[in-house]
Image: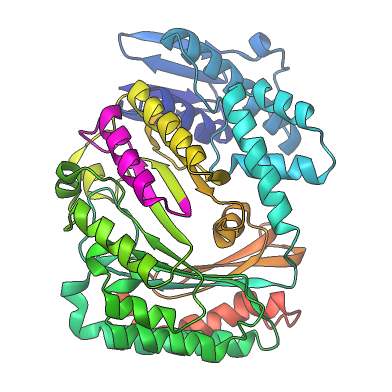
Amino acid sequence: MIRIESKRNKFTYNIYHIVKAFYPGEEVEQKVDAQQESLVTLHMPGDSSFSVLPEEIGLPVIQDPDERQLQTEKWAVTRRVYQYLAERNKSGLAWGILTGVRPTKLIMQKIETGGGREDILRSFQEDFVSREKAELAYEIASREHEILSRLDCTEGFSLYVGIPFCPSVCSYCSFSSSPIDQWRDRVDAYLDALVKEIRALGKMTAGRTPDTVYIGGGTPTTLEPEQLDRLLGTITECFDLGRTLEFTIEAGRPDSITEEKLRVIRNYPVTRISVNPQTMQQKTLDLVGRRHTVEDVENAFHMARKLGFDNINMDLIAGLPGETAADMRDTLAKVEALHPDSLTVHALAIKRAAKFGQEGRTAQLHSEISRMVEDASACARRMGLKPYYLYRQKNIAGNFENVGYAEVDKAGIYNILIMEEKQTILAAGAGASTKILLREPIREESGKEIGIVRIENVKNITDYINRIDEMIERKYRDGISLWRGEDVR
């Protein structure tokens, strides 16, 4: 066990996640004591301890610091703790002291204010980010900046529609999804509520065209062909898609894909689909609860190609329990033979809500995952795919990242928008999260200024069905009215 004692609550988030990145398998306790002398003390395994005193980092002792002073203290303490842990482990972390999920967002801000490449890379390396990761983040942020410059991010919006059903729930998954067999007799009731919400959003956005549409989940292709037809028909009826740049459906699980469903999708202006194996190792597919074979993945992919889908994404996960770098190389060889138009490579993040998290499973060793990530990057580049978006998660294996690679003209625009928070995302469905990008920041009752309003739909499917009118009303009152300049609160 590792115990963290902090003088200020402001330190707890960064210090906890830095410690967990170095010691992912250790239990970590935290305590805040404003009376203690040290800013932070770590009690490490083996009865060793380490403290950060104000004078050691060149800061005066201030009893009631303002927000600016708190930020200065927080980063000085974070840097000192990081240096201690890196020395103790004889190795640093690829992303240094950065704990946020959107490192490219930091670079994007610097690019937008005229920052030069070398100055930006230098600032990242001052936070102990490796040169390799700094260059990757800069390459991606530059590509994102160019793509987003084509959009009206202030007036425009994107539409997300969630289908919370899967053929089975994967052991690593913490998303809000349920096995379709348990809900088969209530899917139409769910669609009734979802269609009602989509129609309401169509009326609220009358006169505006979504830049992107994304149907995710769960697994949208768990719907029957007639249900898919109803959903897609409603979207095309309620929104003007004439200038929409991208329309994605996560076909996802190959065991949910049929020729009839793909033919339904082809009847609509869908431009991009996903066929996601996560791994091409049968032993791992069986372990994680994906009820399909490697051959099913290949057959679904070839079927989609035959029907004319020319923008197909595939997802892989590095660090699944039991897999080695050799397994990943075999998976990559099989994927390369298919040659998808984009490839998203995730480093495993084991969340408490997932079955793996409840079982206490851990990912592979840092060195093994590092080889997997490097091999995946090399494979993507051999296929002519360039990195175009990046994000990180809490509890991510080896402190690595998730990276999307795509052909130059087939980057997933919605993925960029949701990560960089550059545009309003209107979301429908159980567990869907709407993000309203405000023209001008508003001040909350606490006094804090915010530029994004978040409105969450309930995750429980039954509650979603029963409370759909309430959620539609709240979405307009608390968010869309502000976006349209019609504050009705």
Q: Is residue 447 left or right of residue 310?
A: right
Tell me the quarter of the picture where residue 283 sits.
Answer: top left
Q: Is residue 480 left or right of residue 466?
A: right
Task: Please check the rendered image and state whether residue 474 is part of the magenta-colored stretch, yes or no.
Answer: no
Observer-nearest residue: 474 or 7?
Answer: 474
Observer-nearest residue: 402 or 265?
Answer: 265
Q: From where the camera sits, is residue 198 visible? A: yes
Observer-nearest residue: 268 or 369?
Answer: 268
Rendered location of residue 171, percent (x, y): 22, 50
Q: From where the camera sits, is residue 449 visible? A: no
- Write down the region rendered in magenta: 315-342
Task: Please check the rendered image and state whether residue 338 is part of the magenta-colored stretch, yes or no.
Answer: yes
> Could you tell me which residue is drawn at 68 percent across and 33 percent down?
71
Farthest right residue in view: 114
Which quarter shows the N terminus? top left
Rendered location of residue 25, percent (x, y): 30, 27
Rendered location of residue 376, percent (x, y): 42, 36
